[in-house]
Image: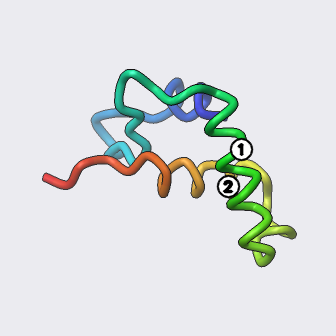
Amino acid sequence: MYETYLATRHPQRAKPFICVKQPAPARDEVIGDFVKFAQSTPQVGDKPAAGVLLGFLASRFPCARK
């Protein structure tokens, strides 16, 4: 999903909202964080998975404000 976000976001029309700093955390760490997020946020259980994941990534990896 993140790769799709990167490939489809038009940088001149849409400001980034997910900014993963390098070095990026381990994949398993981020997956574990998402599982904890999903378990602690039951109100997203009936929402489209892609939107929930993007929302989580935006909160986990916010872009710096200018």
Residue 3, labelled with which disc? none
Residue 47 image point, x, y percent: 79, 66
Residue drawn at (33%, 42%), measured in percent from left and top? 13
Q: Nearer the viewer, residue 4 or 32?
A: 32
Which of labels 2 and 1 is toward the front? 1
Q: Going by the image, does 6 lie left or right of 48?
A: left
Q: Quadrant of the N terminus?
A: top right
Q: Nearer the viewer, residue 28 or 54?
A: 28
Q: Which residue is mark 1?
A: 32
Q: Which residue is mark 2?
A: 51
Q: Secondary structure at mark 1?
A: helix
Disc 1 residue crowd, few under 14, some 14–19, many 20+, Cα 10 Å: few
The type of residue carrying mark 1 is: Gly
Colour mapping: rainbow
First along the sequence among labels 2 and 1: 1
Question: How much space separates mark 2 and mark 1, taking CA atoms?
Answer: 18 Å
